[in-house]
Amino acid sequence: MKLVFHGGGHAEDNKALNLEALRMCKDNDPVITYIPACSIDSEGDFLEFAKSFQDIGVGRFLYFPIDVPFDQTMLMQVLKSNMIHLSGGNTFYFLNTMRKAKLMPRLKEFVRSGGVLTGLSAGGIMMTPDISSAGYPEFDCDVNDEHMKDFRALKLVNFEFFPHYRNSKRYEQELISQSKLIDYPIYAVPDGNGIVVESENTKFIGKCFCFYKGKKIVIGR
């Protein structure tokens, strides 16, 4: 398993995480696919993403929005990529779209087959057991305009991911409360920092925070 979780931020904030993802590709000329959470106005984000990898030597990219019609030939090319990146955006919309496109099992198989899967913010949440962390705290959460009730996601890891974390009392109190309701840890990650999962190993890039059973632990540096 090869996964990278980005807490957020712009391309220049994520160079260390991008280098980790590129290292795990183990290919001198990798193909990277970018899947936006929503196709509307996503081209600019894709170009910024591609530029960040061009700066470290990557030259081949696919842009693959999934909330517009696509053909199976294109999907086959995507699944042959060395790396697939799930972008940030509205997590509820992204999950609903991914289900409609029937991509959940295909992405799981991509990971099982050795592909590198990365996600920024909403894209990272998609790789966890469910997307509950997109719905809190009330003062800073995604709007569930899809009226979704089934939050089950890819479940590639046994932790919850909380991106864009700010080390403040308001966030801390909310995550401590949420951590008492589940049986696995919540990893709260500020912009520019992240988590790398490689086989059975988990590495934290930058300072991150673990909330578990009502306790807060600082991890990484």
Image (spheres, rainbow, N blue to C red):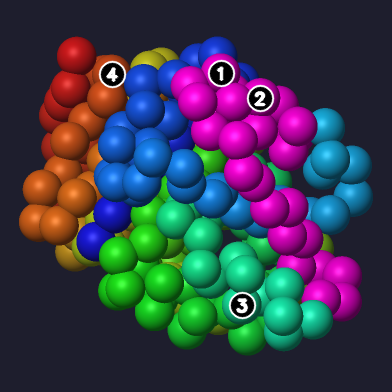
In the rendered image, the residue lying farthest to the front is: 28
Against 61, residue 158 (above or below) is: below
Mark 1 sits on what residue?
55
Tell me whether the residue at label 3 lies in contact with that at label 2, contact meaning CB atoms closer than 8 angstroms. no
Q: Residues within 10 Å of mark 1 (few under 14, many from 20)?
A: few
Out of 141 and 160, give the one closest to the viewer: 160
Q: Residues within 10 Å of mark 4 (few under 14, many from 20)?
A: some
Out of 137 and 129, give the one closest to the viewer: 129
Tag on residue 76?
3
Percent across and percent down for residue 9 are 56, 22
Which residue shows up at 73% across the image and 38% down it? 46
Question: CA separation, marks 4 and 2?
Answer: 23 Å
Against 106, residue 142 (above or below) is: above
Mark 2 sits on what residue?
51
Question: CA separation, marks 1 and 4?
Answer: 21 Å
The local secondary structure at tag 3 comes to helix
Q: Earlier in the sequence, mark 3 or mark 4?
A: 3
The local secondary structure at tag 4 comes to loop
Question: CA separation, marks 3 and 1?
Answer: 27 Å
Q: Earlier in the sequence, mark 3 or mark 2?
A: 2
Q: Amino acid at mark 4?
A: Gly
